[in-house]
Structure formats: C-alpha cells, structure tokens
Amino acid sequence: MESGLPSADFYGFESLLSDVERAKLRDVRDFLAKEVSPYATDWWNRAEFPLEVLPKLASLNLSTPVQQGYSYLFSGMVIAELTRADTSLATFFMVHHDLFVEALHEFGTEEQKSRLLDDAMDLTITGAFALTEPLHGSDVAGGMATTATRDGDTWILNGAKRWIGNGTFCDYMLLWARDTADGAVRGFILDATLPGVTRTAIENKIALRTVQNADILLDNVRVSETDRFAGINSFTDTKHLLRGSRILVGWQAVGQQLAAFDAARAYAVERQQFGRPLAGFQLIQQQLVRMLGNTTASLGMMARVAQLQQDEHLGPQGLPHSGADMAQAALAKSYTSSLMRETVALGRSIFGGNGIVTDFGMAKIFADAEAIFTYEGSFEINTLIVGRAVTGVSAIL
C-alpha cells in the first residue's frame, strides 16, 4: 500500500484469519513481492511460463491449504494475493493444486495417491484439468465428445480438448471422457507423454498470456485401468470439486480488483496534471471510491461464501444453513466478476493513454480480467444457474 494510506481491504477482512494464517499470508506477500511482481509483466509480454519459479512456489507449502488444516477464508485469500501479483500464476496454481491435486485427494485410489500425491504437492510433477472441448464448453457435461473404450486392463481414449491450462508442459492431466459402453463420464490420470497425445499451444491470446493453454488431441491413446479415477463414475461425482474451483475464481475476481485499485491509486497520487496530482480531481476520487466499493463488496461476498464452506467442512452445527451450494458459488463468481469488469475499466480510465501499454501495469490487469469473467462458467451461464435456483424454472434448456 501507499505509505500512510489504508489497505484496499478497507473493512479489514484479513483480521478474520487466525494469527497463524495472517503470518502465512505475509510470507506469501513477501514471496510474491520478491519473486513474482517484478517479473510478471515480462513473462506476460513474452507469453512464457516461468518454470524456474515453481520450486520457490512449492517451498511455501500451500498445496490444497484446506487439506492441511487452513480455513477456506485463508485458502481464498491466498488465491486473491496470487492474482493481485499475477493472474497467470494464480491460474496455474488453481489448475494444478485446486483441480488436479484436489482430485487426487478426493477421488484417487491409495495406490494413485502413493504414486503421485507427494510429488504433485511439491510441484516436482505438474498437472492439468482437461475438460473443455473445441465444440463443448458450457454444455460439456452432456455434450462431451471425447470417448473412452475399455479393452481388457486398458482404456483407449480418442477426442480433443481445448483451453487446457498448463497443457503444454504438464506431466499429467485429469482427463474426462465418455465411456462408449454405457455413456457415463469417466476421469483418467493421463500421462501427457503417452503415444497418441498431441499438445499444441494456443497462440495470440489477449489475456493470461503467461498461462500455457493448449489444444489436446487424443488418437487411440492407451491408459491403464490403474490410471482411472475409481471414485468418479459420473460427472455429478465432481460437483464438489467444480464448485470449489468456481468459488476460487470469485476470489480471483477479488484479487484482480485489489491489483487494479493498488495500481490506480498509486498512479493517481503520483501523476501530475495541471500542476497537481490526479488524485486532487473530484472525478478521479469518485472513480477510486467506486473501485474500492466494488472490491469491498466482492470481498464481503467471498468471505461469507468461505464461512458457508467452513460450516459444511466442519459438519452441521445447528445452523439454519450449512455449506455453499452450486447456486451460491455461481452467484459469487458471476457477481464478483461483473464488479471486477467495472473496476478494471475505471482503473484503466484513470491511466489515460498509459492504460493501454503494459509498461504501467494496468493494461495487463485490464486484459486478464476478461479471462476471469469467462472461465469456470461464463457470466451468462452462472447467472442462469442462480435464476433456476430462485425461480425453480430452468432457462438453460
């Protein structure tokens, strides 16, 4: 923060963390300030992922924090802080830890956990989550075209996946395919180096340029039965996993707004026009306060969602409602990301022409927000999920 000025966490939600969690969050900030923030724009401009940072990131020991006894609020704030420093690195972290590693925790056999879990938590190996397809995004649960055919003790996979984060360099993917025998959706631990797997980087992106999204082609790829997630027998088995990742994208929307406010306030205080700081003009102050209000509202919503998650994790405690359901996750993601869109646009405006070049930081923040607005369910789909919950009528189909 600027010297003597209040934090963008204007209502002090961080104070809800335990002393241990606040100390750990400070460690995260120190790491990001030293190892990420000074270099993130260069990585983004070159569209290259900093693999050399992974051992340092692993040293924070933050893989699946809730599995280690931390609160859901802390877990969300970690994602917000990672996003505040670099949205791309936060996205890598979520794909690897909160989808691939979490899936090992929840659905893996004891043999699979013994073989992969420690290395995955230490980032010695990296994972991806291969669900979306070229022709199926929002409708992938019912329209999945990638197939899995049982052949003795192996499965034969055919099809294509698209927008797979970490896909160009990961060691393994949690890959989804439809069983040709009964139409059920299965999950597989796919060794990305197997014969028949082709990975191609998606080029020319205007957001998350550091994230290595890939097109994946599968041509008669043979996977052992021992690499099938035995705990997944239908797409609904993953509801908890996907709900959690959707909530974490809501925390990304918080982090993106924190980054935008930090950058815009610093620029407004330092930039001189007409002989005084930009911050001395009424319209600039109005924009900054609007940004702060959006950020605070988003933080408040996500903190409440974390409480609901914590209630569910600890079990019923006589509360009128326990747990965060999919509709609540959808509202959190859609609402915070819509506020985020306004916040980053206001921030870009404060920078004027300097807001469209990455040299000043805000252009990267502005562009990356578009990816957050879209993935883990588009704004429109998440809105319709909530609409169905509050009316009892589906407008999706």
Image (cartoon, helix red, strand yellow):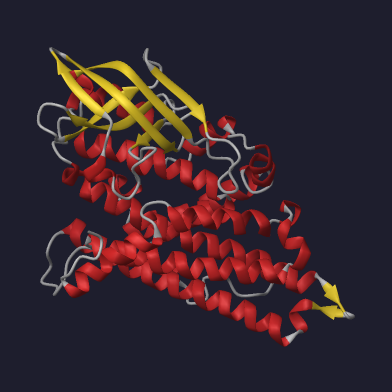
In percent of width and height, residue 169 lies at 49, 26
Farthest right residue?
275
Above or below for 88 versus 54: below
Instruction: Locate the C terminus by quadrant.
Output: bottom left
Residue at x-position 31% and y-position 62%:
330
Residue at x-position 47% and y-position 45%:
91
Q: Is residue 191 left or right of residue 274?
A: left
Instruction: Locate the N terminus by quadrant.
Output: bottom right
In percent of width and height, residue 47 lies at 63, 37
Residue at x-position 54% and y-position 65%:
257
In percent of width and height, residue 221 lies at 30, 17
Q: To which quarter of the image does residue 380 belong?
A: bottom left
Q: To which quarter of the image does residue 271 belong?
A: bottom right
In this view, the residue in front, 361 or 57, is 361
Above or below for 351 versus 371: below
Above or below for 326 versus 175: below
In this view, the residue in front, 274 or 101, is 274
In this view, the residue in front, 7 or 89, is 89
In percent of width and height, residue 284 lies at 70, 80
In this view, the residue in front, 19 or 213, is 213
Say whether residue 17 is visible.
Answer: no
Q: To which quarter of the image does residue 180 belong?
A: top left
Above or below for 396 versus 198: below
Residue at x-position 12% and y-position 64%:
316
Say whether residue 374 is visible.
Answer: yes
